[in-house]
Image (cartoon, rainbow, N blue to C red):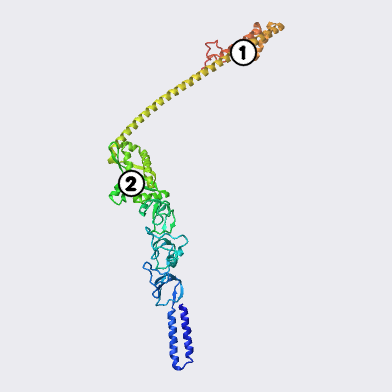
Amino acid sequence: MGVVLFLFALVLAVALLVGATKAPAAVRRPAAFLALVIIIAGAVSTPVVYVGESELGVVVKTALGKALPPDKIIATSGEMGPQAKVLSPGWHWGYVPFIYKVETFPVTRIEAGEVGILQANDGKPLPTGEIYAPEWASGTLEKMIDAEHFLGGGGGFRGPQSTVLTPGVYRLNPKLFTVKTVKVTNIAPATVGVVKSNVGDLPPGVAGASGVAMRLVDQGQRGLWRQQLDPRQYYLNTDAYEVTVINTAAQVVQYTAHKGNEGKNAKSESEAEEREINVRSSDGFTFPVDVRVEYFIEPQNAPTVVATVRDDKDGLQRVLNSAVRAIFRNSAEGIKALEYVQQRSHQEKIALEALRKDMVRYGLTIQAVRIGNVGDQESLGKLLETQTNRAIALEEQTTLQEQQRTAEQRKALSRTTQEAEEEKRLATAKYEVTIAEENKQKKLIEAEGEAKGIEIRAEAQAKAFTAIATAIGPTNAAMLELLKVVGERNINITPRVFVGGASGGSGAALVGTMLDSLTARDEAMVPGAAPPGVNPRITNPDPPPAPAKR
């Protein structure tokens, strides 16, 4: 409309100027002045507005319109006040200065790692009991930030919005929306997020919002979600969704008597004292026990932790400390101090079972319970010293008994060894007797065989001699046998034959010589006999003649 008026004024001004050229001189000057006024009026009634590339324009109508209703601040039907529609970058015509005012604003930028939280300054009132507007459906964000749609057919609610702006550039009406940026919700590794939702439907059976503070509900309902957020980044409205980060890594809590980091870093004396465990035994001894508890929170149990103790830090530690102290004190009441010291592993097992049973309702998984030092010199020093002396005495007694058993075993071993040697010798003797008996039988058999052989040979020789004697006569047969003996035994018969001469006969001489030779040979075999060549019958042989004197 503004452009049409400007063109009409321009045409009218040109027509006046053309007409003035044909009019008298007195009329030309007023006609030219009137044409200039028409052109200026047309230009003023048709202004041009420019919006930069990184800007947007907000039009505020100041005249020629009806007033906005009291509950509205943004005009959607030409009312006076801020208009819902914004101007995009470029040139815009027709915004008459005395009717419209155009304001420019920078576009809204959400940087990486940030989330934009929206507050709507206009729209329908929130439903009763709601403090956040319902979240817009996925994929409808562009329609939401369009002020005309939000306030018109979109039916947007004024107040805090559940829907957020993710990283990007947005041309939204700053008169309608206020934006603040926060960091994205980052769930780091070895942690999970537990969401307490302030928006959504109330769970069944709950009449008001106060009844869902610590109740586990399904995702999308108002209350504490039973489904945890796994490690990654989430674009959440941190006002509408409160996230508690729970550590799922293994944790160790140490309970010592002012020792270690737990005692040194205690914030107060009462906190350090809370970390000490002093127990009293059935026989009246009070002594400290160093305890280490290892635990972790399973991801699916993180909502239970938040629902029962609110977090995994102070809230959880107070419950855990109380349970550990009570369990160890109750366990020590039923046994004596010395038994407690000696049964440390058994006490660990008892404490582990009791602590697991007690902490499961808080969503805590107890992995191990370790007992370190039990007692100290001040509390159990005399008892332990007495026990040590008793143990030493028992050990010495055990050692003596062991030595006695060793001596008895050695004695038995020596006896067994001796018996084995005797049996060995007896077996050897029996074996030797058996061998001797066998040798005896062998010799008897050999002797019998030799005698039988001699007998057979003698009979054969007798038969042979008889046959020879029959053939050549007894004397000649005897002589023949003698000559055999002389030949077989190499007997020297010459001297006796010559000495005997003819008077004794050659046979007698030969027999004598043989007898002397056999006798000398037999005597030479007798110990102490005279050497060969010496006549044993001469007892006092003559000494050799003395050499002659000169």
Q: x%, y% of residue 62?
A: 39, 74
Q: x%, y% of residue 80?
A: 39, 72
Viewer-side label of 2, 1: 2
Residue appearing at x 47%, y 83% in the figure: 10
Disc 1 marks which amino acid?
Gly
Query: Which image quarter: residue 484?
Result: top right
- Image height of 87 relative to 432, above or below: below
Residue 449, numbered circle? 1
Q: x%, y% of residue 196?
A: 39, 54
Residue 336, numbered circle? none
**Would residue 406 appear left or right of 484 to someone viewing this image?**
left
Residue appearing at x 45%, y 84% in the figure: 39
Q: Which residue is mark 2?
A: 321
Query: Which image quarter: residue 441?
Result: top right
> Can the viewer see residue 30?
yes
- Image height of 328 relative to 27, above or below: above
Query: Which image quarter: residue 113?
Result: bottom left
- Label 2 and label 1: CA atoms lie apart by 112 Å
> Can the viewer see residue 533?
no
- Image height of 81 relative to 395, above or below: below
Alpha-carbon neighbours of circle 2 within 10 Å: few (<14), some, or many (≥20)? some
- Image height of 269 relative to 474, above or below: below
**Would residue 179 appear left or right of 497 to someone viewing this image?**
left
Q: Earlier in the sequence, mark 2 or mark 1?
A: 2
Q: Residue furthest right?
A: 471
Q: Nearer the viewer, residue 343 or 494?
A: 343
Disc 2 marks which amino acid?
Asn
